[in-house]
Image (cartoon, grey):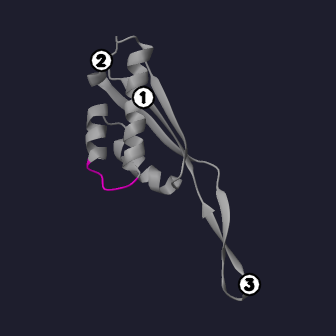
Amino acid sequence: MDSTAHLRHVRMSPRKLSLVAALVRGKSVEAALHILKFTPRAASAPVAKLIKSAVANATDKSKGQVDVDTLYVKTISVDQGPTQRRFMPRAMGRATPIHKKSSHVHVVLSEAKK
């Protein structure tokens, strides 16, 4: 049984989030959360929260029949979200653009075969 969770409109660039997502892809849930706990990147906190949410979705969806110890991160993907466009004033009346990027993260957990 697969369990999914989505994290949308994270105010972090997809490039930064995908580095953290690559660390936990294919790992068991327990190992993934342990890796994220000791990863010194800001993106590790929202990804860990998303994986915990997917575990909660799995237990709720199966009404407690799923074994949490056998769950692993089947897929985790990071997509680009909407970009906020701002302008910073510069010298001689000019302005330079600032692009504040956001991301969408999708995770799918599955039970390992016994």
Residue 54: assigned label: 1
Taking the spot 72% from the left edge, 89% from the top edge, the residue there is 92
Q: Which mark is nearer the camera, 1 or 3?
A: 3
Q: Are marks 1 and 3 in contact (CB under 8 Å)?
A: no
Taking the spot 74% from the left edge, 84% from the top edge, the residue there is 93
Task: Name which residue type carries label 1.
Answer: Ala
Q: Is residue 25 visible?
A: no
State the extent of the magenta-drawn residues as a range.
Answer: 38-42
Q: CA distance from mark 3 to mark 2?
A: 62 Å
Instruction: Name the residue beneath numbered marker 3.
Output: 93
Judging from the image, what secondary structure is the residue with disc 2 in? Answer: loop
Task: Name which residue type carries label 3.
Answer: Gly
Measured as percent of width and height from the top left, residue 35 is found at 27, 45
Q: Are marks 3 and 2 in contact (CB under 8 Å)?
A: no
Q: Quadrant of the C terminus?
A: top left
Q: Is 109 positioned to the left or the right of 8 in the image?
A: left
Measured as percent of width and height from the top left, residue 57 is found at 43, 23
Task: Name which residue type carries label 2.
Answer: Asp
Q: Which of the two residues, 71 or 87, is positioned nearer the viewer here?
A: 87
Judging from the image, what secondary structure is the residue with disc 3 in? Answer: helix
Among numbered discs 1 and 3, the one appearing first in the sequence = 1
Q: Badge 3 local density, few (<14 within 10 Å), some, or many (20+)?
A: few
